[in-house]
Amino acid sequence: MEKFTKRDLIELLSALSDIDAIVGSDSKAVSFIYLATTVGKMLDISMEYAYKERSQIQNRVKNTTPFLDILKNALSC
């Protein structure tokens, strides 16, 4: 089994945030930073630089979504 990183988690949370997949009790999409902070607390990991890492992920030129590609491949098996 592969070891995944916090950056992989941020890639996933970024994708979910970009499509407004997670909504609050008011039925409105939650912000990326709220989502990252909440998940970070749930998993007991620091998400202090999540927004900066998200920006780096969004600026990739090659291999733009490696973790999401792994998820897609896992679903197609």
Image (cartoon, rainbow, N blue to C red):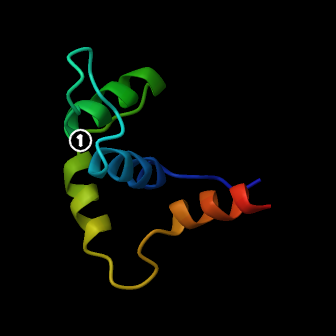
Quick check: 14 left or right of 31?
Answer: right
Quarter where residue 59 is shown: bottom left
Question: Is the residue 36 above or below the residue 11 in the image?
Answer: above
Q: Position of residue 29 (x, y in %)?
A: 23, 33
Of residues 1 and 20, the one nearer the viewer is 20
* Residue at the bottom extreme, as displayed: 62
Q: Position of residue 75 (x, y in %)?
A: 70, 55
Residue at position x 21%, y 62% from top?
Answer: 55
Quarter placement of the C terminus: bottom right
Residue at position x 23%, y 41% from top?
Answer: 32
Quick check: 48 left or right of 74?
Answer: left
* Amino acid, disc 1: Phe
Q: How many marks?
A: 1
Quarter where residue 25 is shown: top left
* Residue at the front extreme, as displayed: 27
Q: Which residue is mark 1?
A: 32
Question: Is the residue 49 above or below the residue 22 in the image?
Answer: below
Of residues 35 and 47, the one nearer the viewer is 35
Question: Is the residue 59 above or below the residue 48 in the image?
Answer: below
Question: Is the residue 63 above or below the residue 37 in the image?
Answer: below
Residue at position x 41%, y 32% from top?
Answer: 45
Q: Position of residue 69 (x, y in %)?
A: 57, 67
Residue at position x 29%, y 33% from top?
Answer: 35
Badge 1 density bin: few <14, some 14–19, many ≥20, Cα 10 Å: many
Q: Position of residue 76 (x, y in %)?
A: 73, 62
Of residues 53 and 32, the one nearer the viewer is 32
SS category of the residue bearing label 1:
helix
